[in-house]
Image (cartoon, helix red, strand yellow):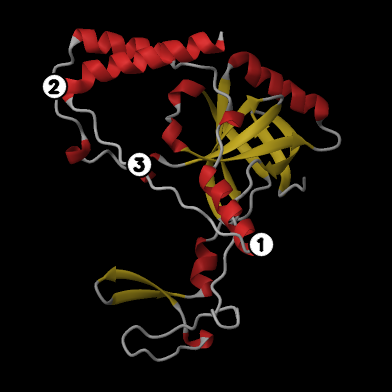
Amino acid sequence: MSSIWSGAISFGLIHIPVTLYSATRENTPKFQYVRKKDLCPIGYVKVCKATGEEVSWPEIVRGYEYDKGDFVILSDEDFRHAALKRSEVIAIEDFVDEKEIDPMLYMKPYYIGPDQKSDRIYNFLLEALKKTGKIGLGKFVFQKKEHLVALKAEKGILVLNTLRLSGELRHPPKESLPKKTPVPGRELAMAIELIDKLSVHFDPEKYHDTHTEKLEKVIENKRKGKKMHIPKMKEVSATQVPDLLAALRKSLHKAHRKTSHIH
């Protein structure tokens, strides 16, 4: 695996040379638009939305619309004034408990490994984070953008997650919040029992991207000239309140049979 950045982690007066690796990969098939009759790839031209005229690249500038139809034009020089210098150091400023970070703030994970000569001091930080259960917070300029990042010990390696800033999260719309209604004790107890019956240890290998798997199968069958049978989607109706108790009983019975079959 090739590294995508090299630099150092610092906290206090400690400076640890490290390298950064992507922890995710994109598995979705890539598609192109092509002309049907001869499979010629399709390109796009820039046109003026008002007149439909084609616009050449030298005529195009970037503008910020601050009011309807009114723009501030920014030059390359303007963007350079706002640009931040690429970070050579991931500076950890604070340490917090993991439970204090809202999971909705997490964005993209990266692996951080030691460089060739920093294994000992790297392991010192790795073990310290593991023992304390703390997460380091800092800022990091990467790919032309400043990121808030969280550093934690995970699976024998340091993992860096980019985080959303709090202002990037929306509050739930009021109309989406449920109305306050009484929750019957018997139904609640059965729901809790059902949740307990269906509780397992999390195994990420159990879950697959079924849409991509089906799409890849469609592509392969089309390539081989095979016809595909598309099953009809079953309609599922919402459980009504009067049917809730019966639905819970059936679900519990099914869960009991499932667990007894496993054991």
Location of residue 184 by image quarter: top left
Quadrant containing the N terminus is top right
Q: Position of residue 39 (x, y in %)?
A: 60, 78
Q: Using a 10 Å C-alpha cutoff, classify the residue at mark 2 as few (fewer than 14 neighbours), some (14 to 19) or many (20 or more).
A: few
Q: Which residue is mark 3?
A: 234
Of the two numbered discs 3 and 2 in the rendering, the one whose residue sits closer to the viewer: 3
Alpha-carbon distance for marks 3 and 1? 29 Å
Q: Which residue is mark 1?
A: 224
Mark with earlier residue (3, 1): 1
Q: Position of residue 30 (x, y in %)?
A: 59, 61
Quadrant containing the C terminus is top right
Q: Position of residue 26 (x, y in %)?
A: 61, 50
Q: Is residue 134 left or right of residue 235?
A: right
Foreground residue, 223 or 177? 223
Alpha-carbon distance for marks 3 and 2? 30 Å
In this rendering, is residue 95 above or below 159? above
Residue occupying the point 19% across, 22% down: 243
Question: What kind of residue is marked 1?
Answer: Lys
Residue occupying the point 61% across, 49% down: 27
Q: Which residue is mark 2?
A: 181
Circle 3 SS class: loop
